[in-house]
Image (spheres, grey):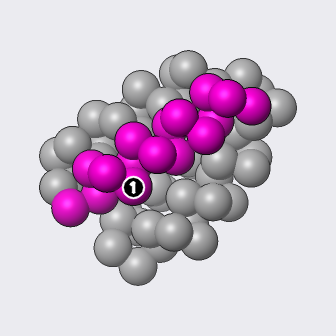
């Protein structure tokens, strides 16, 4: 669970930049175990759905 919280913290800090957000999202998906990915996906859409939806759609369609 600690890795999930770490990845969330990083995304919050880099959300101002599309490039950094996409890079960190990609890394975060690689670091998390499958059991955490559903919770992470839901959190990402709730937190960044308005600002980064195309990026989220690109990575979460292929992640599951």
Q: Residue at x 31, y 51 (%)?
A: 13
Q: Residue at x 29, y 58 (%)?
A: 15
| Front residue of this view, candidates 21 and 5 | 5
Q: Up-down: is 56 above or below 25?
A: below
User: Is residue 15 inside the magenta stretch?
Assistant: yes
Rendered location of residue 50, percent (x, y): 41, 79
Rendered location of residue 11, percent (x, y): 40, 48
Residue 36 visible in image: yes
| Front residue of this view, candidates 23 and 58 | 23
Determine crowd level at label 1: few under 14, some 14-19, many 20+ residues with C-alpha closer than 10 A: few
Rendered location of residue 41, percent (x, y): 63, 52
Q: Up-down: is 30 above or below 20?
A: above
Residue positioned most to the bottom: 50
Q: Residue at x 40, y 32 (%)?
A: 26
The secondary structure that dominates the magenta segment is: helix
Residue placed under numbered mark 1 in the picture: 12
Q: Secondary structure at mark 1?
A: helix
The answer to whether residue 10 is left or right of residue 4 is left
């Amino acid at each position: 669970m600690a890795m999930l919280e770490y990845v969330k913290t990083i995304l919050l800090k880099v959300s101002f930049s599309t490039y950094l957000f996409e890079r960190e999202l990609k890394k975060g998906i690689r670091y998390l175990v499958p059991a955490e990915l559903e919770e992470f996906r839901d959190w990402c859409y709730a937190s960044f759905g308005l600002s980064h939806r195309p990026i989220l759609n690109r990575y979460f369609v292929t992640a599951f």
